[in-house]
Image (cartoon, helix red, strand yellow):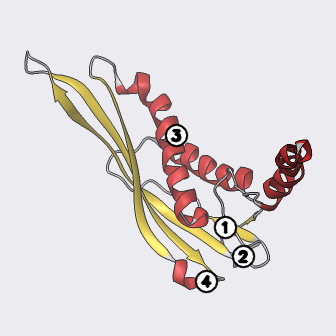
Amino acid sequence: MNWIKRIPRVAVLFVLPIVVIACSVSYKFNGSSINYDKVKTISIADFPIKSEYVYAPLATRFNEDLKDIFIRQTRLQLVKPNQNADLQIDGEIIGYNQYNQAVSADGYSSETKLTITVNVRFVNNTNHAEDFEQQFSAFRTYDSTQLLTAVQDGLIAEMTKEITDQIFNATVANW
């Protein structure tokens, strides 16, 4: 009768590892779902600033961050825009604006909202059903007692990261 009590323990020792191995789940932490058999190259054109207010370092920062996210998180080869890449991204920075966000009791602005808006055109030459043109934006608020010149580089860094993440997810993550 003692051997019957041991069967469940022995069975668990042998069956559990088999179940764990058979039921493994695979996750990609970068979020991309690219079929590398079909898609091998990407071209990303520089995005010019076409907003009313122009801050020149914004274009440089955005363009570098956008290319960098695809280089770091995919195996796609970055090629020049005129080389018929499998995936093509281009567009323009259409908004760089600041607005009064909140008013204090004395009637003056207490918070300012800084917004960046980017228009993106995406072409998937291996599956044109995934092509799109879409706007992406991000904003940050800062205390109105601070000058924009004092905070804008830090805020731009945060917002360009957020927008490039949005573009990455919309183009190759297929969420």
Query: Which residue type does callout 1 highlight?
Result: Ser
Q: Is residue 124 above or below residue 96?
A: below
Label placed on residue 83: 2
Dot 3, how many residues are within 10 Å of its Cα: few (below 14), some (14-19), or many (20+)? Answer: few
Q: How far is mark 3 from mark 2, CA to CA?
A: 27 Å
Label placed on residue 57: 3
Q: Secondary structure at mark 3?
A: helix
- Closer to the camera in the image, 80 or 121: 121
- Closer to the camera in the image, 45 or 19: 19
Query: Which residue type does callout 4 highlight?
Result: Asn
Please say if the residues under marks 2 and 1 sit with CB atoms less than 8 Å apart.
Answer: yes
Q: Earlier in the sequence, mark 4 or mark 2?
A: 2
- Closer to the camera in the image, 149 or 132: 132
What residue would you read off at disc 1? 43
Q: Residue at x 80, y 57 (%)?
A: 19
Q: Earlier in the sequence, mark 1 or mark 3?
A: 1
Label placed on residue 127: 4
Q: Residue at x 53, y 83 (%)?
A: 129
Q: Give the left or right position of residue 25, taking residue 166 as reference.
A: right
Q: How far is mark 2 from mark 1, CA to CA?
A: 8 Å
Q: Earlier in the sequence, mark 3 or mark 4?
A: 3
Q: Give the left or right position of residue 174, taking residue 119 as reference.
A: right
Dot 4, how many residues are within 10 Å of its Cα: few (below 14), some (14-19), or many (20+)? Answer: few
Q: How far is mark 4 from mark 2, CA to CA?
A: 18 Å
Q: Earlier in the sequence, mark 3 or mark 2?
A: 3
Q: Secondary structure at mark 4?
A: loop
Q: Give the left or right position of residue 160, taking residue 54 as reference.
A: right
Dot 2, how many residues are within 10 Å of its Cα: few (below 14), some (14-19), or many (20+)? Answer: few
